[in-house]
Image (cartoon, rainbow, N blue to C red):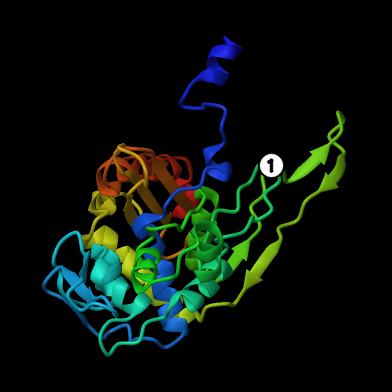
């Protein structure tokens, strides 16, 4: 039986939560927005034109070659909160990589803030096998692929595609930092070790990795966008829960495979006084709104039903 399990192609013993790394898809967008606010790239109320549902970039060396970067639909003119809620790719292309006269973050600043949120390195959980994931940059691409870095690479990172890879643990830790006003905690499983007589041998205190790295007013804007994703956006299925939820869906293309896209959801609740954060990925299941959000709903319902008195 054990041999059958370890040879199973689905790898049931593989700890996906801490060792699996995946394209983040649109769940990366709240962190790109946070970086744009921190760097004063854009006013959150300013609107970007997404009426076409795509942008086009000419090749610097041959203007006859035109690259098209598509949205999943045309969204009209969207500000930051709306862009998070409806997951507008064009908005994040522009604030991430720039477009025409708008100067975006660029990959160096994107990498800086994704690293600050805990992506691209291990968080130090007290379990073996934690993976670091990857936040790519020009040096990495030159070393790994012997290729130069292009604006299209920055666009891809800005929507969680391309070579960016994250673990579910990193995602939930980063979302918790948005929820709790900017503290990234070291994730921990063990609170204490006791002997057979229940005497404490060792106790583990909460550890802060970093805090106060994003202005609290900026984080409030991100939270409002994630709340809007639930009230009228891609996570609308969660809007009838007995407690307010904020979140972000993601549908991440898997490179070099014919499988379906991975479905993501990440979020927190209760919205006004967060106690629980989730990151859910369903491999090869399609859209986050259809496959991951129903799972999140069950977890939030369970949490509410088992913590009703405390939440109320």
Within 10 Å of disc 1 (Cα), the crowding (few <14, some 14-19, many 20+) is few
**Residue 235: percent from the left, percent from the top?**
27, 54
Quarter of the image that includes the C terminus: bottom left
Residue at horizontal 55 percent and vertical 69 percent from the top: 139
Q: Is residue 105 above or below residue 201?
A: below
Q: In this view, does 88 lie to the left or right of 130?
A: left
Name the quadrant containing residue 223.
bottom left
Quarter of the image that includes the N terminus: top right
Q: Nearer the viewer, residue 224 or 73?
A: 73
Residue occupied by mark 1: 127
**Residue 135: percent from the left, percent from the top?**
51, 62
**Residue 14: percent from the left, percent from the top?**
56, 32
Q: In this view, does 311 lie to the left or right of 289?
A: right
Q: Which of 198 and 278 is in front in this view?
A: 278
Give the number of callouts.
1
Q: Is residue 247 visible?
A: no
**Residue 98: percent from the left, percent from the top?**
33, 81
Q: In this view, does 144 lie to the left or right of 35?
A: right
**Secondary structure type for disc 1:** loop
Residue at horizontal 30 percent and vertical 77 percent from the top: 94
Q: In this view, does 4 lie to the left or right of 202?
A: left
Q: Is residue 213 above or below residue 202?
A: below
Name the quadrant containing residue 258.
top left
Q: Can residue 303 be seen in this view?
A: yes
| Residue closest to the far front | 62
Residue at horizontal 36 percent and vertical 46 percent from the top: 254
| Residue closest to the far top | 1
């Amino acid at each position: 039986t054990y041999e059958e399990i370890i040879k199973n192609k689905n790898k049931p013993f593989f700890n996906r939560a801490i060792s699996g790394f995946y394209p983040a898809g649109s769940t990366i967008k709240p962190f790109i927005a946070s970086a744009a606010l921190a760097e004063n790239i854009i006013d959150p109320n300013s609107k970007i034109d997404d009426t076409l549902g795509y942008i086009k970039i000419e090749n610097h060396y041959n203007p006859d070659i035109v690259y098209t970067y598509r949205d999943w639909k045309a969204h009209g003119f969207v500000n930051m909160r709306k862009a998070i809620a409806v997951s507008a790719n064009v908005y994040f292309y522009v604030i991430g990589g720039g477009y025409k006269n708008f100067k975006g973050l660029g990959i160096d600043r994107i990498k800086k803030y994704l690293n600050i949120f805990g992506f691209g390195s291990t968080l130090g959980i007290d379990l073996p096998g934690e993976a670091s994931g990857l936040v790519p940059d020009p040096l990495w691409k030159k070393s790994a692929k012997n290729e130069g870095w292009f604006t299209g690479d920055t666009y891809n990172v800005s929507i969680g595609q391309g070579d960016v890879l994250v673990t579910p643990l990193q995602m939930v830790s980063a979302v918790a930092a948005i929820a709790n006003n900017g503290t990234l905690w070291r994730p921990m499983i063990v609170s204490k070790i006791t002997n057979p007589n229940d005497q404490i041998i060792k106790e583990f205190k909460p550890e802060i990795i970093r805090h106060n790295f994003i202005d609290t007013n900026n984080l409030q804007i991100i939270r409002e966008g994630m709340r809007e994703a639930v009230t009228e956006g891609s996570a609308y299925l969660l809007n009838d829960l007995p407690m307010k939820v904020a979140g972000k869906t993601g549908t991440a293309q898997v490179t070099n495979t014919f499988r379906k896209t991975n479905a993501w959801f990440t979020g927190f609740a209760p919205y006004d006084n967060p106690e629980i954060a989730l990151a859910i990925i369903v491999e090869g299941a399609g859209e986050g709104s259809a496959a991951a959000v129903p799972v999140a709903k069950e977890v939030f319902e369970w949490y509410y039903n088992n913590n009703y008195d405390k939440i109320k």
